[in-house]
Amino acid sequence: MNKPKAYFFPHRPQPRRKGKLRLPSKLRSIQLIITLTFTAVTVLVAVIVSFMLYNKFAATAEANANMNMQQIIEQVNYNLDLYAKGMANIFATAEEHITASPSIDSPLLSERMDTLMSSREDLVSIAVFSPQGKYVVGTPGQNMRINTQLQSQSWFTSAVKNPEISYSAPHIQNLFKGRYTWVVSISKMIEYKENGQIRKGILLIDFNFRTIDELSRQVKLGKRGYAYILDPLGNIVYHPQQQLIYAGLKYENVEPVLEYKFRSYLDESTGEKRFITVRTLDLTGWKIVGVAYYDEIVTTKRDLNHFLAWFLGVVIVGVIVLSILLSWLIASPIRKLERTVKLVGEGDLNTPINVSGAYEVEQLSRRFNMMLQRIRQLMDQIIYEQETKRKGELEVLQSQINPHFLYNTLNSVIRLAERGKTDEVVTMIQSLSKFFRISLSKGKNMITMQEELDHIRHYLVIQSFRFKNKFRYEISAEDGVLACQTIKLILQPIVENALYHGIEMLPDEGLITITAELVEGLIIIRVSDNGLGMSKETLGTLLSGGKSSSGSGVGVRNVNERIGLVYGREYGLAFESELEEGTIVTICFPAVQAGTEPEEGREDSVQ
C-alpha cells in the first residue's frame, strides 16, 4: 500500500517594520473592538425599544387582533346563515308545490319544479323518493344509477328518523347517471298525492357545495390563519387543508369546539399558540371555527408602524454612523486577508498568506499557513481512504443482494416440490444455477452484455414462477452490443424495482421490456414496464439520496454510482414515469469491446 504524500512548507516570519509605534496586541484585538462597540449599541437599542413598546402595545395588539378575528368569523357565520336560510326557503317552496299539487305526476308541478330549478345556479337536483327507495319524480329528468344503496345514505336515514329538515355533510352525488357533483343534501319526509291517495315520500334537494366552499375559502386570518367548518357530530364539512387532514398530516383538536356554540380561547394542542373562535349556525348546527396563529398576531401589529417610524429612524442613523466607523477600522486588513485567501480558494495551495494588521488577523495568517500545510498532507490520504471505503461499500451492498434473493427463490422451489411440480423445480434450479454463475463471474466486475442479458433473463424466469406468471417480459439486443463489456449486475436492481414497485400491485398482466442498442459509440439500455409508475416527487428522490415513500431507490442509486465511478459522472441512469402509465429507465455508458467473445450465442426470447 502506497502511503499518501506529505508536503512541508517552512514558515517564513515576516520582518517587522522599523520606526513605527505599535500598540499592544490586546488593545488591537478585533474581538475587543467589535464586542465593546456593538454590544453597547445593541443592548442600548434593545432595552429602550423593548421597554417602551412591550408594555404599551403587547396586550393591546393581542386584544385587537382577537377582536378582528371574531368580527371576521361573525361575518362568515352571517353569510353562511343567509345561505342556509336561502336553502331552507327553496326547500319550503318545493315542499309547498308538491304538497299542493293534485298529483305528483302533474305537468304543472313539473313546470314549477323546472322554474324553481332555474332560479338558482347552485341547485343540482330536486327529487322525491318513496320510503322504500323508489324514485318517484324529479328534475332535471335523469336515469337512476344501479346499486346506489340509497336507503343507507345519511340524508335518507336522517329524513326517515327526523321530522325536521336534515342537512347532510358534503358528499359526492351518485344517484343519477353521468353526474358526480360535490353537494350538500337537504331532505325531509313529506306527503304527496298520487292516484287520488296521499302517500309519504322523501324530498331531496341537492345544492352544489362550491358556493359554501367559496364563502369559506375567502377567509384570511393573517398569512397562515384559516377557517374550517364542523357538523354537529364533529365531522369536517370544510377545511382549506382537507387533504392533509385525511392523510393524517394535520391535526385539529375539535373536542373543545364541540362543547360550545360561541367561544374564543387559546389553543396549544398542536405545539403552537393559536387563537380559536367558534360560532354556530342555528339552522344546520354547523360550527364555523377560525384559527389565527399567535406569533403572526404579535409580529404584525399595525399600530406600531407610526410609533416606530420616528423612534427607530433616530436609532438607525446612530447605528449606521457607528457601523461605518467600525467597518473602516477593521475592513482594511480583512480585505488584504480576503484577497490572499481567494487565491487559495481558487486552488493555489502553495500561496502563503502574509497579512499584517490587527492581532487576530496576524494570528489568523500564521494559523492559515499551518492549515494549508496540513491540508496538503491530508488530501492524498483522504482520496485514498475514500476510494477504499467506496469500493468496500459497493462490494458489501452487492453481496447483500444474492442471499436475500436465494432465500426467496429456495422457498419457491420448496413449495413447487411439495406440490410435485418437478418440471418447474428443474427449470428454476437451472435458472438459479446460471444466475449465480454469471453473478460470480470468477470474481470479475466486468462482464459482456451477452452475460448481463442472460443474467437478467434467468432472474426473470425465476421471478415469473414466484409471481405466478403475473407478468411477461421481452429482451432484445443488437448484435453489436452483445460483445461489449459492462459492469455486472446493473439490470437486476432496476428490474426488481419494476416488479415490486410497479407490476406487483397491478390488477392486470404486467409487461417488462428490455432493449439494448448502440448509438454513436454509446450503449443505450432501456428497461420499461407498464406498472403503476411514479410521481414527480418520487422521481426526484431516486438518485438524490433521499428515501421514497415506497422504499425503492437504494439499488438504482447503487447502479448509478457504480457507472459514474467506472465511466464518469456524465453517464448513468435517467427516468421517465407517469402515474398509472409505467416507467422507462435508460442506462447509458460508453461501448467498449470485451477482450474475448461471449461464450454463449444470442438467446433473445419473448415470453
Image: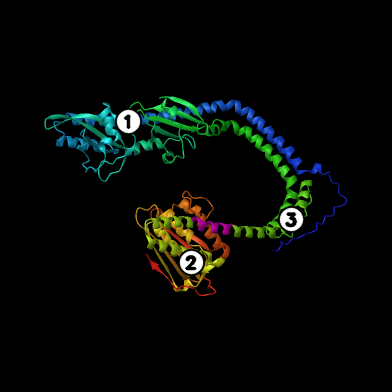
Pick whichever, 312 or 297, lies toward us. 297
The residue segment tinted magenta is: 393-404
Q: Position of residue 452 (x, y in %)?
A: 48, 66
Q: Is residue 387 left or right of residue 478?
A: right
Instruction: Residue at 73% x, 48% y: name it.
Output: 331
Q: Amino acid at mark 1?
A: Ala
Q: Earlier in the sequence, mark 1 or mark 2?
A: 1
Q: Is residue 569 left or right of residue 210?
A: right
- In this view, 521 is above or below 281: below
* Residue 395 is covered by the magenta coloring: yes
Task: For mark 3, give the secondary structure.
Answer: helix
Instruction: Residue at 44% x, 31% y: name it.
Output: 290
Residue at which label 2 appears? 452
Camera-near label (3 vs 1) is: 3
Magenta segment, prevailing SS (helix, strand or loop): helix
- In this view, 578 is above or below 88: below
